[in-house]
Image (cartoon, grey):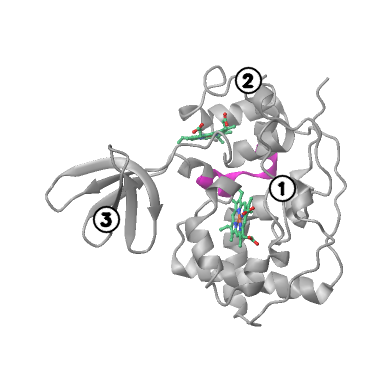
Amino acid sequence: MKEIIWISVATLVAAGVAIAQAPTGQGKGQPRGPSKSPASRPRPQTLTPQTYPIEQIQAGELRFTAQCGFCHGRDAAGGETGPDLTRSELVAQDTRGDRIGPLLRDGRPDQGMPAFNLSDTDRDAIVAFIHDQKTKFEALGGGRRSVEVANLTTGDAQAGRRYFNGAGGCSSCHSPTGDLAGVATRYQGLTLLQRMLYPTGRPAPARPKVTVMLPSGQTVVAPLTSEDEFTIVILDSSGARQTYDKSAVKFKIDDPMSAHFDQLGKYTDNDMHNVFAYLDTLK
Ligand code: HEC
Ligand code: HEC
């Protein structure tokens, strides 16, 4: 019998605690384990102490909860698939977003950290919240709270199926007898949860597609290689990289994963448990 260890998302994410124990029965390609973020590691000191207005911190908390909390924990101290940001070297070295900003823009898609297209206001608020959390945790001292990993599958697969076909809109892109047939055999436990929230690792999801309208009127549709404030880089049909100045062309980026992004902010804990329970029946 296959054993699935399910961690109560309500407890975990609400408390923002990290997994202290690896689940059994992990599928192949589990990209990271809890051993990478040991609670015993000392919290690196913030190089440039910084403070932020309370309103900005509160705005950041809302954004963070919606877009980052599922992975990093609602209090940024580590969650189901993302590391403890209050112990991050990158955060410790950050001054007002100079390190965090570029990371959010580019992500580390191969490592499970998505890229985010945030407004400056949202980005600054998130940065304020992360620094404020770090300061709070430093003041608390001590180590990270450990989690009791409960062995439960609390979701209701029937309700999950309804959500999948209804409110969740999953069935507009997926089918339990098509692409998701056997998904629970390919991935188990946390790996399945991670694939469900935001598929990363192997096999890597398709790259975003970009449509570029050149000044000549010609239209190019190609996979996006990278993007920054000023340029977009695509892979043309011969496999060569082409760089376009954003101010010189019209373009539209079509990211097949954007539905999963949006979904991160929409799931309730119950929906997430239920959908997971449903997917877990697709063996
Ligand atoms: C789908 C899960 C997921 C989401 C959503 C997510 N992250 Fe991450 N994040 C990760 C993972 C996994 C890593 C570790 C990547 C690595 O190992 O290099 C990471 C790394 C980071 C780091 C760097 C930590 C370090 O020390 O290198 C920062 C900062 C960060 N995330 C902030 C955010 C913020 C802010 C958001 C929301 C806007 C967010 N993340 C959303 C999964 C996620
Ligand atoms: C707009 C389209 C779209 C919607 C809506 C959508 N997804 Fe996805 N989903 C994708 C894409 C694209 C991938 C990446 C598939 C790939 O490239 O292999 C994916 C991957 C997945 C995977 C991983 C499959 C695998 O074999 O690795 C799971 C699980 C999943 N989605 C579940 C869901 C659930 C549950 C919902 C509804 C809450 C949902 N998706 C809604 C487009 C969508």
Q: Secondary structure at mark 2?
A: loop
Left or right: 233 with respect to 67?
left
Q: Residue at x 73, y 65 (%)?
A: 87
Please identify the dominant SS of the magenta region: helix
The amino acid at mark 3 is Tyr
Q: Residue at x 74, y 56 (%)?
A: 16
Q: Position of residue 105 (x, y in %)?
A: 47, 59
Q: Are marks 1 and 2 in contact (CB under 8 Å)?
A: no
Which contiguous range is marked in magenta?
261-271
The amino acid at mark 2 is Gly
Where 154 falls versus 216 (above or below)?
above
Nearer mark to the viewer, of 2 and 3: 3
Task: Indicate the quadrant where residue 139 lies.
Answer: bottom right
Q: Residue furthest left?
A: 216
**Sooner in the amino-acid sequence: mark 3 or mark 1:** 1
**Sooner in the amino-acid sequence: mark 2 or mark 3:** 2
**Residue at image mark 1:** 80
Q: Secondary structure at mark 1?
A: loop
Nearer mark to the viewer, of 3 and 1: 3
Q: Residue at x 45, y 69 (%)?
A: 120
State the residue in front, 228 or 61: 228
Task: Indicate the quadrant where residue 14 lies.
Answer: bottom right
Where 238 falls versus 87 (above or below)?
above
Q: Position of residue 243 (x, y in %)?
A: 29, 54
Residue 182 is marked as 2
The amino acid at mark 1 is Glu
Q: Position of residue 282 (x, y in %)?
A: 65, 21
**Residue at image mark 3:** 244
Query: Is the CB atom of the residue marked by disc 2 within 8 angstroms of ligand 2's nearest atom?
Result: no
Q: Is residue 55 magenta?
A: no
